[in-house]
Image (cartoon, helix red, strand yellow):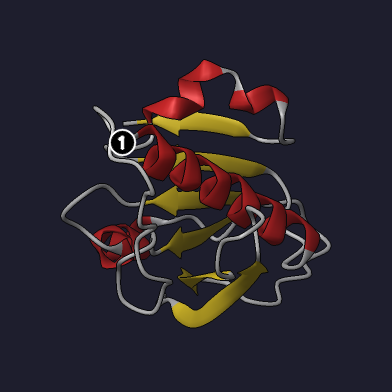
Amino acid sequence: MSLSWSTAQLGVLVPGDEPVSLRYGDTHPGRSDAEPYTTIIAFHGTGFNSIIWSPWLEHLPANVRLIAANRRGYFGSSPVHESQQLLPNNPEAFGRYVVDTLAFIKFAVDVLKVEGVRVLDWDSGDFVDFGTSRLVPCSFVDH
């Protein structure tokens, strides 16, 4: 099993910002099985890119679809957001990361028509514990 690469054009997510695109790999693009399956949408941590998930591919069951997204600033995705005001912990850039992540999940549900969504976020995604699971029809796993 391998990843097929494409780019999600997410558009302008915050008024005044440039349009956002995120590069992603998908183990089953266009999947339309009659049998139910689970989709894992995986977001890499700082210092990695979505290739970090490659060792998993040979171990995934047939009923699991993996979609691995590259965050801003990583190969094929939009540049990192340039904050207007640098504050401690850079809340503006972190807020864009949250918006990007939710927009990509929405893209996967609406455009890729994934089902049985589970979100795996490594390292920078601790925001998922703050209630975003109420905003999108999926569950989150944070490692």
Q: Do we see residue 38 in this rendering?
A: no
Q: Which residue is mark 1?
A: 90
Q: Quadrant of residue 3?
A: bottom left
Q: Is residue 9 above or below residue 68?
A: below
SS of the residue under disc 1 = loop
Residue at 48% across / 19% down in the picture? Answer: 129
Viewport quadrant of the C terminus: top left
Residue at 33% across / 63% down in the picture? Answer: 50
Front residue (pair 49, 74): 74
Residue 35 image offset from top left, x and y in percent? 78, 57
Front residue (pair 28, 75): 75
Q: Quadrant of residue 78?
A: bottom left
Q: Do we see residue 19 in this rendering?
A: yes
Front residue (pair 67, 127): 127
Q: Is residue 48 left or right of residue 3?
A: left
Front residue (pair 74, 118): 74
Viewport quadrant of the N terminus: bottom left
Residue 111 image offset from top left, x and y in percent? 76, 67
Residue 7 image offset from top left, x and y in percent? 54, 78
Question: 10 Å neighbourhood of mark 1: few (<14), some, or many (≥20)?
Answer: few
Q: Amino acid at mark 1?
A: Asn
Residue at 59% across / 18% down in the picture? Answer: 131
**The residue positioned farthest toward the left in the image shown:** 47
